[in-house]
Amino acid sequence: MNYRKSLSKNKKISQKEAEFIRNTQNPDGTWNITWNWGMYPEEWHISKNRWKSDVIIKNVRFVSEMEK
């Protein structure tokens, strides 16, 4: 799938999403992880940082594509 083509086809909703992403960014440049692994707190403590990295990459990529 062509990422940029998909964004342009859904421009209005994509712009709203980019605005939401910008508004929910924490001062340290990260975003909150909104889920957890309730039964596995020790494993989640480790994995949460990996998920945080994944969310950062996806959000920055999305917003930067919208600004082009």
Image: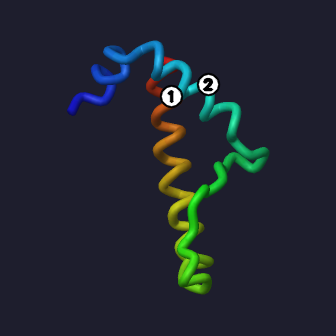
Q: Position of residue 50 (x, y in %)?
A: 52, 66
- Judged by depth in the image, the label closer to the viewer, 1 or 2, is 2
Pointer 1 local density, CA inside 10 Å: few below 14, some 14–19, many at least 20: few
Q: CA distance from mark 1 to mark 2?
A: 12 Å
Which residue position holds label 1? 64
Element at badge 1?
helix
Left or right: where 6 falls relative to 39: left
Q: Tag 2's secondary structure?
A: helix
Looking at this view, is 64 or 1 the one in front? Answer: 1
Q: Position of residue 44 (x, y in %)?
A: 56, 77
Task: Give the residue type at disc 1.
Answer: Ser
* Horizontal and vertical percent position of residue 57: 49, 47
Residue at horizontal 54%, vertical 84%? 40
**In the rendered structure, which disc, 1 or 2, sits on the residue that comes first in sequence?**
2
Q: Amino acid at mark 2?
A: Glu
Q: Residue at left 69%, top 41%?
A: 25
Percent of width and height locating residue 8 = 35, 15
Badge 2 is on which residue? 19
